[in-house]
Image (cartoon, grey):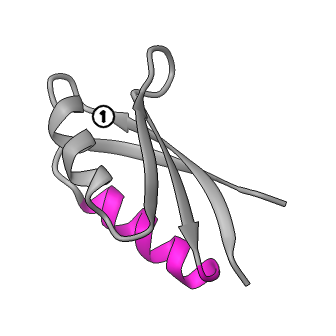
Amino acid sequence: MTLNACILIKTMPLHTNTVFEKTRNLKGVRKVFVAYGRYDLVAFVEASGYPEIRRLTGEMNSETGVRSTETLVEA
């Protein structure tokens, strides 16, 4: 079963570009966009299941400069 998800990422000031580059190189990440507002980045991911989505969000949250993430899984 393939799951698609949108992961909203808040970064610390001046870390958006670094987090953008690291995020776009993660396995499973299809697209990353810079956003302006409540979230700084939006990542679209494709995963084989919920465990892989948890792994991806864990990797993103452990990156230096990431304040928080919110994951929206396609229904």
Q: Which residue is mark 1?
A: 11
Q: Position of residue 19 (x, y in %)?
A: 23, 43
Answer with left or right where residue 12 lies relative to residue 42.
Answer: left
Q: Position of residue 50 (x, y in %)?
A: 63, 79
Residue at point 44%, 68% (across, down): 28
- Between 32 and 9, the residue placed more toward the observer is 32
| Badge 1: residue crowd in 10 Å (few <14, some 14–19, many ≥20) | many
- SS of the residue under disc 1: strand
Picture quadrant where residue 9 is located = top left
For the C terminus, give its image quadrant.
Answer: bottom right
Answer with left or right where residue 63 lies relative to residue 27.
Answer: left
For the N terminus, give its image quadrant.
Answer: bottom right
Q: Is residue 25 magenta?
A: no
| Stretch in magenta | 48-62
Instruction: Identify residue type, mark 1.
Output: Thr
Residue at point 21%, 52% (across, down): 22
Above-or-below relation of 54 to 61 = below
